[in-house]
Amino acid sequence: MNKYLKSKTSLFLMELIITILLFAACGAVCVRLFVTSYVMTIDTIELNESVSIAQGFAEVMRGTDGDIESVLEQYPSAVRGGDGFFEVFYNENFEICDYSDAVYVSDVTMTPNGAIQNMEVRMVRLRDYKEIYTLNATKYMNRTKG
């Protein structure tokens, strides 16, 4: 009689171990899915905000007379670089900030080509210098420049 009691206990213990291993495997898969979905959400937010910011630069260029001075009037916190180049820095919430608090940067290059003004806007994550989005825009200036 004692012999049967031991076999039932060991069978129950083996079943319990298998169940725990199954739940652990399912938990690992679920955690992986949640982490992947979180990363995809962050990437999507970055892309949407970057597209919006880049389109804003293009609309300002098209809505003004199209040269760099008129665009910089709309972005007073922009850091002007070389000829036809400026940067605007953004924090983690995509709000304009100083370089010390910056997480993202938009690099804007404006190059005149006869009567056409070209603009390239690049949004870059500063942590790993990953380019998030690039937009090229043009405007017919109705006058030759450059």
Image (spheres, rainbow, N blue to C red):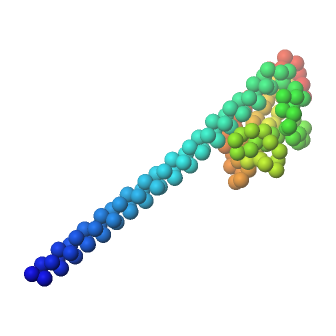
**Residue situated in front as seen by the camera: 66 or 8:** 8
For image coordinates 38% across by 63% down, the residue present is 24
Q: Is residue 14 above or below residue 87?
A: below
The image quadrant where one finds the C terminus is top right
Residue 54 image offset from top left, x and y in percent: 72, 33
Q: Is residue 33 left or right of residue 86?
A: left
For image coordinates 43% across by 54% down, the residue present is 30
Res 41 → quadrant: top right
Res 47 → quadrant: top right
For image coordinates 51% across by 51% down, the residue present is 36
Q: Is residue 7 above or below residue 141?
A: below
Instruction: Determine if residue 102 is in view.
Output: yes
**Residue situated in front as seen by the camera: 133 or 94:** 94
Residue 23 image offset from top left, x and y in percent: 35, 60
Q: Is residue 81 left or right of residue 62?
A: right
**Residue situated in front as seen by the camera: 143 or 91:** 91
Instruction: Determine if residue 107 is in view.
Output: no
Q: Is residue 3 above or below residue 97?
A: below
